[in-house]
Amino acid sequence: MIRERAYPVEPWHVREVLLDLDVLAQSESIFALSNGHIGLRGNLDEGEPHGLPGTYLNSFYELRPLPYAEAGFGFPESGQTIVNVTNGKLIRLLVDDEPLDVRYGELLEHERILDLRAGTLHRYVYWRSPAGREVKVRSTRLVSFRQRSVAAIKYEVEAVNGPLRLIVQSQLVANEALPAQSRDPRVAAVLESPLLAEEQLTSRDGGLLIHRTKVSGLRVAAAMDHEVRAPADVTVNTEGYEDWVRTTIGCVLEPGEKLEVEKLLTYSWSSQRSLPALRDQVGAALAAAKLDGWDGLRREQREYLDEFWDAADVRVEGDPEVQQAVRFGLFHVLQAGARAERRPIAAKGLTGPGYDGHAFWDTEMFVLPVLTYTQPSAVRDALHWRHATLPQARDRARTLYLEGAAFPWRTIEGPESSAYWPAGTAAFHIAAGVADALRRYVVVTGDTEVEQSIGLELLIETARLWRSLGHHDRHGQFHIDGVTGPDEYTAVKDDNVYTNLMAQRNLLTAADVAMRYRDQAIQLGVTEEEAAAWRDAANAMHIPYDDEVEVHEQVEGFTRQEEWDFEHTPSDKYPLLLHYPYFDLYRKQVVKQADLVLAMHWRGDAFTPAEKLRNFLYYERRTVRDSSLSACTQAVLSAEVGHPELAHSYLREAALMDLHDLNENTRDGVHMASLAGAWIALVAGFGGLRDHDGEMTFSPGSPAGSAAWSSPSSGSNSGCGWTSGRTRRRTRCGTADRTRCWTYSTTVSGSGSPATSQSPCRCPHPIRPVRPPRSRPAARRSARPKKSASSTPGATTAPSIMELGHHANLTNAIIWAPQLHDRGVEPERRVRGVRRWSACPPRRAGPSPSGRRRYAPGPPRPPSPGRVPRPPDVAARQCPACRTSAAGPCRSSPSGGGRGPARRSPAATRARHRQTRPPPAGQLPGAGSRRSLTAGDPVSASGSSGCGGRAGVIVAESRAARPGCGGSAAVRPG
């Protein structure tokens, strides 16, 4: 846990102003550099001390056995683990025979800066040796985006007093000793000396090492070369052995003189190419890097990132810490996929060995949506990688006696590497995620070549999987049984809503594309009967719904399960999976991460606004967020259903997951999906971006008086610029006391004609979501300063996430959205204008778009024996204006209708609403606690309190909160 907030808030830098050896491993992940092919952890130049050494190449792995107490048919027999390859970052310095080590002598100053615009890691050290000799060391490190195989370091030593005799030792080292890991199953297995030496070569200025893995047989080559500049004579020589090559540079410096060393590194690996071919490849890459030199590499890096930020930047006003964190997240997401080139994007990228370097479903459902709008070429490469793994996916499906392709839950090269069936293979929803990533990429970019060449086959094989995995019951409804959804605490269940809805879209998309490219589909064996069967299954898809509680069941029967005893769950027992048996988790109502709530985000077209609100309130109180994937999705839905403060808190949690090490496992690498999720929370939550039905729509929710958000219109990736503007005026909303409040006119425009519509009052919903008492260990709630190896005098550190908390209210901010790529899509199709949606639509009979049956209004059913009564967050609270359940349709709405609970007495209503009354102005609810971090409590009365309103981002001014009913329509771009 990063207790001391060591990173000052700056818009384009992550600056470490103190060196805390207790969190060195975390900072190594934060300062990791990568281009999607090479990954260098942010280890100190001298190599020691270190938290976790790491140099990685995408998809370079070793095989290891997967042990089982009792093996079963279809269980994977071996797993893949990413390998720490040859380390070329090492540069040791000796000052008059004393090695520079921050643990010895006196560290006068120490600073590291991750420059998000330059793509470099800069370090400054001012050190006094035990003998009193002083030196200043400056190093700058980069991993090239332009030259895929190249990394470079500029190392500069300045003598402060002297003369000083300096020795610089620059090395390549293979088979580094790694520290022991924890028993956490999310941590990578440690492989001892996984590389076998094949060749080592040396020259005066550098050398080369070639190794191969013992079992997987992959071969890796690493080479280095140096350019040395000094005011006096310099000696340079290189020596090499099986596992290391060392170039030694010696000189004598007078006070004020500098020694400069430019180190070039190149890497390459292959499973098929010969040793001579690999040797020549790294030699050629080294020659190309020398041709440009350090200055050329740094210039190319800046140009590449200038193009990226011109197209992808998200500008936030009102919360500078979120601004910094979102850019930090975008930078790491870019690093993970920029030059992966038909290789996977792992859950930790190339920043650490967490999860054994595996790629999961979150690549397609969190990372690729961001890259689709910011760096679509990386998405194209990721889809090509998935397509390349189709042979293994088909084999896996045949092993399971299924048709089509069963993509692995976790993998590096393609085979399933998960040893735990309920939270692995049973999570078939990954297939729908692959199909949805493809669908979104084609919609946004218009890349029909990818759709024809690889997309059609991916869609066909995944559709065949769903058709063989599910079945029609005797009533004709289609069920998918025995699967695990995103929530890993609810495993091997029937009819997971997220899985069913995503499979429904997968089936319909496959049928449409197959009919669009009939000739290619026929070559792949698709008949009209098979496509019709896909449509029948999609239209008959069963979506579980509890009519008594009036919420969707995450899985069939979920609302009938026993409730988890949160009250007696100690704070030190989180995450639950490390302290309770899965058997206990699987049979109770406890949610690890957003599941049905995730379905309401990606398949929001299958739910009404009223259903979203009721579902959100029900599942919010049962979700413990033991996964870093949850906060961003909860932020999106919090904003949509009318809880902007809660959305802001979840946004902060997602954005600061690694900068504050909230889950205490950043040491193993950053959480790529959570970092991408911060962008999603901003753009989809507060910006209202949706891409249902093949068209993008927006519903920006910033309450700023003029421009709410805008996309850059420059840069090579830009297709067109989009702007959303707001103007405001005072009106009377439909509340009981006719309160005056602000309403807004929203304009969304592009190159076509702008569309404008008047929004009604968007007062916040009066019912605050009830959440489980998810307190963290005390270390997470305190930010007590610790002794550090160094600190810079006068440096201002960022406030903790708890300290800043609600002070920076994003509902009173201006959000600038990212560039959205056109790539062949006509601008007028991108935003179709704005239409009015009812916040409280009446229930209606007949089939819904999701294929399930809606029921006409009627008297409430009597409770069934053994059924859990409706929880208080849904049933027991009423709107003061209309006396109906705030979670159900509002009777005071012009479009209101449907069932509502019986009236309460005035005294009971007042008592109930006292529980949701906002605190006095200026009072922060529970400041400094973990709970206040994600609480939905109103802060400083920053918004009007009302009911129901439309699911969306609240537009609020800082004024006294008033109760009211917002059951009228709200603006939603359509």
Image (cartoon, rainbow, N blue to C red):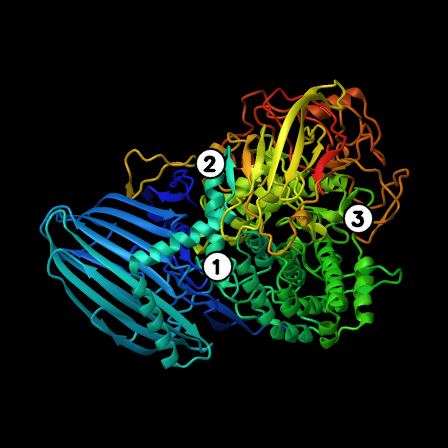
Residue 347 visible from this viewpoint: yes
For residue 678, above or below residue 202: above
Extreme residue toward the front, this view = 752
Q: Residue at x 22, y 67 (%)?
A: 247
Residue 42 visible from this viewpoint: no
Nearest to the eye among marks 2 and 3: give it. 2
Residue 563, horizontal then vertical, whole percent: 70, 45
Q: Which residue is mark 3?
A: 545
Q: Residue at x 61, y 55 (%)?
A: 365
Q: Which residue is mark 2?
A: 320
Residue 480, horizontal then vertical, whole percent: 76, 61
Residue 914, horizontal then vertical, whole percent: 68, 23
The alpha-carbon separation of the residues under discs 3 and 1 comes to 42 Å
For residue 133, above or below residue 903: below
For residue 377, above or below residue 960: below
Mark nearer the N terminus (2 vs 3): 2
The alpha-carbon separation of the residues under discs 2 and 3 comes to 42 Å
Using a 10 Å C-alpha cutoff, classify the residue at mark 1 as few (fewer than 14 neighbours), some (14 to 19) or many (20 or more): many
Nearest to the eye among marks 3 and 1: give it. 1
Q: Which residue is mark 1?
A: 338
Q: Quadrant of residue 488?
A: bottom right
Residue 233, horizontal then vertical, whole percent: 11, 61
Q: In this view of the protein, which residue sits in the foreground, 117 or 908?
A: 117
- Residue flagged by tag 1: what amino acid is it? Ala
- Residue flagged by tag 3: what amino acid is it? Tyr
